[in-house]
Amino acid sequence: MLNSPGSILQQVRNQLGYTIDDVHIKTKIKKEYIKGLENDDISAFPAELYYKNFLKSYALYLKLNPNELIQIYEQNKIEHQKNLFRQDKDIEKNFVRFYKNNRNLLIYVGWSVCIICLLIIIIVNLPKTIVINKTKQEQSIDRNSMVVSTLTGVVSPKAEEIKKLTVQNKQKLYIKALADTWIKIVADNKDIFEGTITKHFEYKANDEFIVKIGNINTVEVYFNDKLVDIKAGKNSKSNVRTIKLLKNKIVHLTNMSDVINKEQEQKSYGNNIVVSTLTGVVSPKAEGIRRQTEKQSKQKIYAKEANTAGIIKKEQEEKADGNKIVVSTLTKVVSSKAEEIKKLTGQNKQKLYIKALADTWVKIIADNKDVFEGTVREHFEYIASDEFIIKIGNIDTVEIYFNDKLVDIKAGKNSKSNVKTIKLSRNKNEQE
């Protein structure tokens, strides 16, 4: 018996005088498959099943027993696998023999390669390490730079100012915003920032900071790298807080009306201000105000800053320009000239009414003039000729009425920030 099915097929075909073309025409088997069968090339077929089927067809055409050829193929395959197994065993034995004979040499070579690789890594990364250390040193020198992340960009002082701030014994302020938060910062009696931060704020001062926060639940304040408990002494529903940070002292400005009074006096434009509270009059010059209110019995001044315990405005004057700010309690509106306000509302004026559900910081510009900035605890009313621009610290804690109609201040809200600025005019309302 011959060695393989392919050699048998080829020998019989030659004896019968058939060509490959003759086989192709009669069996419809492709020529390349016929050559593959005669050469015992299994790789010429898509799968072993195709090889066996074509082998049977070819054998029947040559009038051979296909089962005998299949059996020869299976026996050759088993023998081939045994040979491969023997070769693998021989290779394994040779490797084991080589390892036993040269074990010490292999260990020595392995350790040598590891040491060489380690030295290469150290040499390659040494310059980078030097550069990184140098960069860190430079950054530690220049860390006094101010970075303020706002809705519009990054604010940074000039390089010369940064160098001046690198002097030792500076007071460091760092504010981390957990959400968009309105803040105002005074450093060494100078206003340095007022607006909304979205990420963080860093600055240095010689002596002190005064920080006014629109929502104490959405920020963390660090003073000289120590976390400040900005919620200490909280005894109201208000989230607005003003704190004073000194080198060895942190003061919550709940009763420091003198600091706030100075700020409010600078912003006073002569408009009559009536701020009512549940407790009465808070003023650093309470005695003087009391005497004046006795002389002007028709006029009462009630003032209070919700979070800082005291926004003191100038006393109403009888000959004011007609603009009146009325911040009422839950039960009534206090106004020295209610009749004049009624007249103004009937003369095509624009009316603003703010109802505070909780203490809320607001800033109001009427007819391009700043008329109020502070915390509204309960109610706020004002009359203008043309328009209002209102900045609200928390839109969830106020209701805005314009010409006696409720304004949808949450319209178009597409961020987590509760801070919003709206413009109210005669025929159009705009929100930012």
Image (cartoon, rainbow, N blue to C red):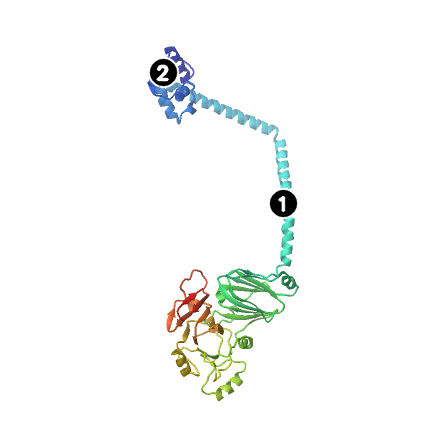
Which sits in the foreground, 284 or 163? Answer: 163
The amino acid on which the numbered mark 2 sits, given as a three-letter code, is: Asp
Taking the view exactly as shown, the residue that stands out farthest to the right is: 167
Q: Quadrant of residue 32?
A: top left
Circle 1 — which element? helix
In the depicted structure, whether residue 4 falls above or below residue 333: above
Taking the view exactly as shown, the residue that stands out farthest to the bottom is: 295
Circle 2 — which element? helix
Q: Say which residue appears at 34% left-offset and 18% top-offset.
A: 25
Q: Quadrant of residue 415?
A: bottom left
Residue under pointer 1: 125
Question: Where residue 52 is drawn, which disc sits there?
Answer: none
The amino acid on which the numbered mark 1 sits, given as a three-letter code, is: Asn
| Viewer-nearest of discs 1 and 2 | 2
In the depicted structure, whether residue 126 falls above or below residue 111: below
On screen, residue 319 versus residue 172, left or right, reads left
On screen, residue 279 versus residue 13, left or right, reads right
Residue 140 seen in render: yes
On screen, residue 27 versus residue 182, left or right, reads left
In the depicted structure, whether residue 114 falls above or below residue 304: above
**Circle 2 Cα neighbour tier, 10 Å, few/some/many (<14 / 14–19 / ≥20):** few
Dot 1 or dot 2, earlier in sequence: 2
Query: What is the spatial separation of the Cα atoms under label 1 and label 2, in whole angstroms?
Result: 72 Å
Image quarter (top left, top right, bottom left or bottom right) of the C terminus? bottom left
Residue 315: image location, x then y, percent: 50, 82
Residue 258: image location, x then y, percent: 55, 77
Q: Say which residue appears at 43% left-offset and 25% top-offset.
A: 43
Question: Where residue 22 is drawn, which disc sits there?
Answer: 2
